[in-house]
Amino acid sequence: MTKFVKKDQLSSSWYEIDAKNAVVGRLASIISKIIRGKNKTTYTPHMDDGDFVVVKNIEQIKFTGKKFQNKKYYKHTGHPGGIKETTPEKLHNKKPGEALKLAVKRMLPGGVLGKKQLTKLKIYSGNDHPHSSQNPKIIELNKLNNKNIIRN
């Protein structure tokens, strides 16, 4: 018999990741698993049981290959002929964390639940962030095996 967690039994932790020399897609997959709560034994697909993730040093994130110049992001304004395109290079110069946020957003479910889970992602340039009082657990990406994400 499957046990489901109730709302009053939910608990959230905080994790801190240093994005220095991290690859965007690999980092986004790790973050999305933590935000969704898939690293917990109490994972329930229809509930927001995920943890908060603080990403620092976002200005030093990397893309593999020539994606930094050649990859395209598209959006539509809603008006006829209103398709706009940009590259990660332009996006990074304007808003450094936006490429990672887009990658994580596209790995989350669509709708209200995905939007709520995306608010648990906090992205900052530099080493300092205002969430040190939450005592986030530090995740070291170079020591992390992708098969074994964070277990509580």
Image: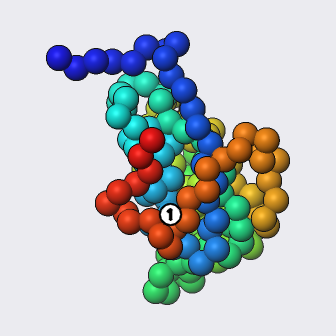
Q: Residue furthest bottom?
A: 66
Name the residue type under label 1.
Leu
**Tag 1: Cα neighbours inside 10 Å, few (<14), some, or many (≥20)?**
many
Q: Is residue 56 above or below residue 116?
A: below
State whether residue 106 appears in this view: no
**Near-viewer residue (49 or 134):** 134
The residue sitting at 71% across, 72% down in the picture is: 59
Quarter the C terminus occupies:
top left
Quadrant of residue 68 in the image?
bottom right
Q: Is residue 114 rendered to the left or right of residue 146? A: right
Label tally? 1
Farthest-out residue, left: 1
Residue in view at x 47 percent, y 81 percent = 64
**Who's the residue at 51% across and 42% down the image?**
35
Left or right of 17 in this view: 95: right
Classify 9 as above or below 137: above
Q: Position of residue 135 (x, y in %)?
A: 71, 44
Q: Position of residue 110 (x, y in %)?
A: 44, 37
82 over 12 or under it: above or below: below
**Residue matched to label 1:** 27
**Colouring used for the render:** rainbow
The local secondary structure at tag 1 comes to: helix
Out of 82 and 102, give the one closest to the viewer: 102
Percent coordinates x, y for residue 91 in the rendering: 67, 68
Residue 82 x %, y %: 59, 55
